[in-house]
Image (spheres, grey):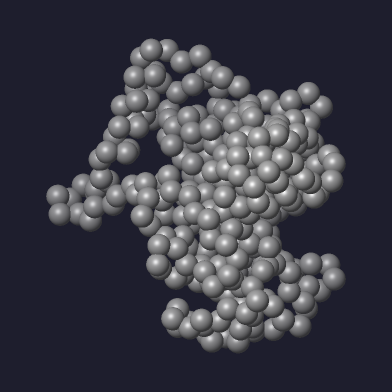
Amino acid sequence: MSQPVSRGTFAFVLLLLAIFVLAPCTTPGGDAQTRFMYLRGQSIHPAFEGWWPNDDGSFTLWFGYMNSNWEEEFDVPMGADNYFSIAEPNALDDLELDAFDAATADHGQPTHFYPRRNPFLFTVEVPADFGEQEVVWTLTSHGRTNRAFATLSADYRMDPQVMSTEVGGAFGSLDDRLRTNIPPDLNVDGAMQRTVKVGEPLTLTASAVDPDDFPPRSDRGKPPENLDEFYSTAGVGSSVVSSAPGVRLSWIVFRGPARHATFEPVQMKAWMDTRVWGNSPWSPPYILPEPPPGNRWTNTVTFDHPGEYTLRAVASDGARFTYENVTVQVTR
């Protein structure tokens, strides 16, 4: 949904972007530490988001990642630079230890990594008797190895309200009803495994509805006209950048080089791009496009290089997420 922008507002946006990209951030003191906005060259940090119990006694562990770059994307295939391990407590604290085992390496993690924060992106299930063991995700990028250590420690127990708080859901609301919020129902038409030729558009149709219509869809009205309106924290109970509530759906490349895939229309970002008008639910002024008729999204994707790709439909109500994967074999 496009918004009319006055010439004055447009000039103001350009000024903001110039300030954010070109100038380092400092605190008031002249000798304060300088913080930089890195476009590329930094590494990826895997993240353990937390866990919750399941009705059958098992546990769901949530993972995501932080790419410290604002522009650079990575492709890290499954292998010695991107793998999972099941370990005893503290066994892999030494980052120089190589614990790669092909039998346990693949736990559904991505191999393509978008910029910045990508929270609650996939889950790992562990049994009721998992005990004090650790699920460890090892990820190496730009020659630097980082690990996420997932345990069933009580400190990491979470619920849907915690998830919403961590992603700034519903403009950062702390409404207690978020504890029982239901994620969108997502349905992707057609087979989950498909074959297409290079240059041949592949149609992707999916529907997403919010069964409890909560948090209710809303935006913040007119486009902002000054700095205070762009980043107003009025009513926000979270320190995390806020996100507009309402059903949305985007396709991402989950596995495979995303540079070879072109979506039409361009997809709303599923990563936390907090820059103004960044085509992201976390981007001020938080105005979401209206869902299409019948809450059915139809897109096409075209590949310019053969290979196997995993595409992921990401549906959200702004506070919780639902995913479906489609594997595409691209031939010449």
Q: Quadrant of residue 83?
A: bottom right
Q: Does 304 sit left or right of 45 as displayed?
A: right
Query: Residue shown at 39%/18% (left/top)?
Result: 9
Q: How many marks?
A: 0
In-front residue for pair 331/27: 331
Q: Does 192 sit left or right of 80 as displayed?
A: right
In-front residue for pair 93/39: 39
* Residue 303 sits above or below residue 51 on the image: above
Q: Does 183 sit left or right of 12 as displayed?
A: right
Query: Residue shown at 60%/36% (left/top)?
Result: 262
Considering every residue shown, the one lying at the far left of the view is 30
* Residue 226 sits above or below residue 5 on the image: below
- Tell me residue 330's x, y (percent): 70, 46
One can see residue 152 in this view: no
- Tell me residue 19's x, y (percent): 29, 34
Which quadrant: the C terminus? top right
Q: Quadrant of residue 59?
A: bottom right
One can see residue 290 in this view: yes
Query: Residue shown at 64%/73% (left/top)?
Result: 105
- Tell me residue 27's x, y (percent): 24, 49
Which quadrant: the N terminus? top right
Query: Residue shown at 48%/83% (left/top)?
Result: 97
- Tell me residue 103's x, y (percent): 69, 78
* Residue 293 sits above or below residue 284 on the image: above
